[in-house]
Amino acid sequence: MKSKSLLIAATLLTTIRLIAQEPPPPPPTTPPPPTTPPPPKAILVRPGAMKVEPMLDPESIPLAKPLESDAAVQGKPSGDDAVKLQVFLDQLNFGPGVIDGKPGLFTEHAVNAWNEVNGHPIDDWSAVMDTARKGVSEPFTTVIVPDILVKWVNPKLPNDRILQSKTKRLSYRSAGELMAERYHTDLEYLLELNGSKKVYNLKAGSELKVPNVTPFLIEKIAGIQHKNNEATAQRHVVVDTKRNQLRIFEATPVALVIEEEPADGSDTPAKPAANRSLIATFPITPGQQRFIHYGMWEVRNCVEFPSWRYDKSLLETGKRSTDPSKVYDLPSGPNSPVGIMWCGLSKSGIGLHGTADPETIGRAQSAGCIRLSNWDVIRLPTLISPGTSVEIR
């Protein structure tokens, strides 16, 4: 019995020693107690005002990374440089559309045209921007509202065509509209530059900040019919209805050579050849697709301050109304549907003309003619004349 007891004791002692040599078991893994979310920020409601203001801690709001503007992403200029570029192109008859410091598709087309004429890569903005900075020292200027508001502004000008036919002139509806068109911009940009208080209270003698461009002087238009000019009659106009551009060329248009075979036989493309025959480009609005008369035509006349016959049937169907009571003769003026200039083509009823809404050029279709802004269309008699060929494509 004694030996048996000793054997059991020895076995127990060995077991205890083995247990002592093992590492202690890991502590039991119990899930952490659920965390209680912080109470929501208080919302303060001020009696009477009913204005809800979250009581946020400004330090807790992360700062967002500023987004790059479309102009910056595309490598286009912004700010004063953008206005300088638009003014520069406008003065050279490469119309950028409304001058507003926001280079869009029409400014891009104007840059392309300038590059085409000067032998630069079509989509290069650096050369034209460098030249614009040198050519336009100041993007803006301060002008005085001229003393012509009584004659050229009619705040009560009706919208109804029947009532318009009974007025003396289709004038501007406000001094702001007059000044915007005068400086090749729109009312929205004048408001941005000057503020609503100043723009909506303009009167003769008021000062106004505007783009530094040669003004469109409505009071200098004499209402004449321009005669044939042998030199300009030889020019050629291309109306591109896909790109909404009117392009004027000396004599026969010469295609731009983008890549020529280098003289040395290398693989390096030659520099684009300058297309000196292109002399002007302007944004346009073509007619509705069903009314566009493609083909080759000829300028027959260019008339300032044309009257216009409003025929709803002709505008909607392309056919003249047989009911004289539904046709109205509208007087001339900057708010005429055909603007301040009509250059009729050899296709009856079709012409190049101005508009009452320059901000819609390229964005809204006309009935069947080719619309330009009034500040662009007034230049046409200095560039083309009766006899000039016009290709609508």
Image (cartoon, rainbow, N blue to C red):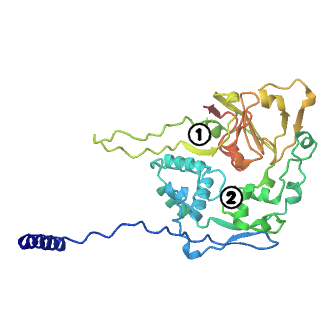
Q: Is residue 164 left or right of residue 358?
A: right
Q: Amino acid at mark 2?
A: Thr
Q: Quadrant of residue 293?
A: top right
* Image point (85%, 51%), residue name: 171
Residue 268: which quarter of the image? Answer: top left
Residue 387 locus on image (x, y percent) = 67, 33
Q: Is residue 284 left or right of residue 145?
A: left
Q: Residue at x 30, y 42 (%)?
A: 267
Q: In which quadrant is the C terminus drawn?
A: top right
Check disc 1 and give the amino acid type. Arg
Q: Residue at x 18, y 74 (%)?
A: 20
Indicate the position of residue 214 as horizontal and vertical percent values: 68, 58
Q: Nearer the viewer, residue 147 or 283?
A: 283
Q: Quadrant of residue 338?
A: top right
For the residues labelled 1 and 2, the Cα–Cα distance comes to: 26 Å
- Mark 2 closeness class: few <14, some 14–19, many ≥20 residues within 10 Å: few
Q: Give the mark nearer the N terminus: 1 vs 2.
A: 2
> In which quadrant will I find the N terminus?
bottom left
Q: Nearer the viewer, residue 364 or 376?
A: 364
- Which labelled disc corresponds to residue 243? 1
Q: Which mark identifies residue 340?
A: none
Please state which of the two labelled residues, at mark 1 or mark 2, is closer to the viewer.
Answer: 1
Q: Residues within 10 Å of mark 1 (few under 14, many from 20)?
A: some
Compared to 252, does 108 lie above or below? below
Mark 2 lies on residue: 214
SS at mark 2 in the image: loop
> Would you place residue 3 above or below residue 297 in this image?
below
Q: Position of residue 385 (x, y in %)?
A: 69, 38
Asked if disc 1 and disc 2 are in contact, CB closer than 8 Å, the reply is: no
Q: Residue furthest front?
A: 1
**50 w.r.t. 350: above or below:** below
The residue drawn where x is 53% and y is 61% is 67
